Image (cartoon, rainbow, N blue to C red):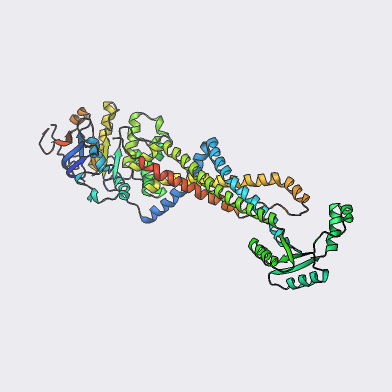
Amino acid sequence: MGRNATPLRTPKVKAPKPPKRKSVGAKSAATSFVDRFQSWQLHHRDSAKDALRRMRQTPAASAMTVLVIAIALALPAGLSVLLENVSALTRGWDGNAHLSVFLKDNVNESQQRQMAKQWGQKIAIDRTEVITREQALAEYKALSGFGDVLDALPDNPLPPLIIVYPEDTSPKALEDLKRELEKERDVDTAQLDVEWIRRLHAMIELGTRIVSALGIALALAVILVVVNTIRLAIESRREEIVVVKIVGGTDGFVRRPFLYTGFWYGFFGGLAAVILVNISLWWIDSPMAQLITLYNSDYALAGLRAEATFTLPLFSALLGLSGAWLAVGRHLKDIEPQAF
Amino acid sequence: MIQFDRVSKRYANGTDALSNVSFTLPAGELTFLTGHSGAGKSTLLKLIMMIERPTSGAVVIDNHNLSGVSNSGIPFLRRKIGMVHQSHHLLFDRSVYDNVALPLIIAGFKPADIGKRVRAALDKVGLLNKEKLNPIMLSGGEQQRIGIARAVVNKPPLLLADEPTGNLDPALSAEIMDLFEDFARVGVSVLIATHDLTLIAKYQHRLLTLREGTLVTDREEDGYGS
């Protein structure tokens, strides 16, 4: 048989051998929409499971990543729990905010009571309390221990005092009321006894801001940790990505396992953060209770809010997902089938 | 099946990889593509796989002009093309079965269907009894046949092979070539890029020769070899 014996355009007709198997035909195998949808669901499930399996295959490395995420989240979460406790503990103290209004020395007791009664009717004032010069002296003697010195004085040096409890205990309202009372004819000076509470509140406010900033910074750190982890995962599966792209895998198909990996890292990191915070709270609970008892309070330390047990892992999972998304978006494009 | 119409490709660095290449490969035909390294074989395959796009001219695959295929449409075009590599591109983290099943999973076949089709493809290449093994345990010839099974498992109308016999001895090469001829016989267009002149001489099929980016021989059309 000559070299040109087989007509090249009609190989079917002069086939030297019969086809071994009919199943290999020229018509591309088609899939229905329902098949593809079910297969898509199946691939989601498989990707989620496969991502978990791969994490288990490298337990040390996975645990490290999860712990880094957990610590990064436990820090702001734990601090915000403490701040919430401090502000809950001091919330009740606002009710004690009052003004000490010292009257001029020439105001006698009946005038003093008259003034207190008048002020008590003002809208801004809840109630007033009269402390006469004698009462003040008695109290001062009892508390200060300078009784003998005071006895030696010819006159009672203490001014008449009216304690004013305002309706509104916000710093601004207190300040306004103080200014108003100081304008009264017989008032010497009015003193705000809540400076330290205002400072405390300012500090709590500052603390909240700092914890928020810390939280944002550490959430970014979580994203970056996941970006880096996923980047390495992509690198180690480069060959597989090339093959998937050659046989017609869409970008979504290639992305999916990595997105699930990021999701799981975030989720377990968040879960571990919840555990870390609870362990830490348990750890400080007994010394904290002692400290609170010393301040004559029966306040009980509040833990992580119940819903945080779910929201923190979910939030963290979203961080992981976005980290994975960033890594995949940045690195998958670099991997194209090149070898020919 | 494949149609190149005055296709040119100039890379960003200014090299002309292909200039004015035109040819048509009908369905059910086996064609060799040859030429020295750098003659444009790789570029030609890349244009078919849409790894690159032509600078000018039209590439038509299975009646789709590729210039009309968006980037998101590329995966769906590639599902019509079975690709066999010299380096097999097999995945050694999974079994032979899972390697061959990959295109079917990607295309969204029913799990029950996948089993049947994978076994049919493995049967075709004579490796049905190896489906549970890891491909790393198999010989080079067997690995190449798994690559072929994976390329044809979803019955693409077009089969591309890049140096499919590059690492194989003549007997194994012959087996592989028999497989390709079988596929051509049932209507698949087969394009084999190869340096292997003995292979080209032994099998009388149409031959496209590239030299410095131009098509210099078309064994069928210019009567070479007849």
Q: A340 and B162: which one is in front?
A: A340
The answer to whether one can see residue A294 in this image is: yes
x%, y% of residue A180?
Answer: 67, 67
Reply above or below: A330 against B175.
Answer: below
- Residue B157, by quadrant, is top left
In the rendered picture of this protein, how many numbered marks are placed on residues?
A: 0
Q: Position of residue A23 (x, y in %)?
A: 30, 45
For this view, does A142 lie left or right of residue A260?
Answer: right
- Above-or-below relation of A178 to A32: below
Residue furthest to the top in view is B169
Residue B118 visible in rendering = no
Query: Which of these two is toward me, B45 or A96?
Result: A96
Compare residues A185 and B24 and report the one nearer the observer: A185
The quarter of the displayed image where residue A15 is located: top left
Which part of the image, by quadrant, shows the C terminus of chain B? top left
* B83 relative to A96, above or below: above
**Residue at 41 percent of width and 30 percent of height:** B137
Where residue B221 sits in the image (x, y, percent)?
A: 11, 39
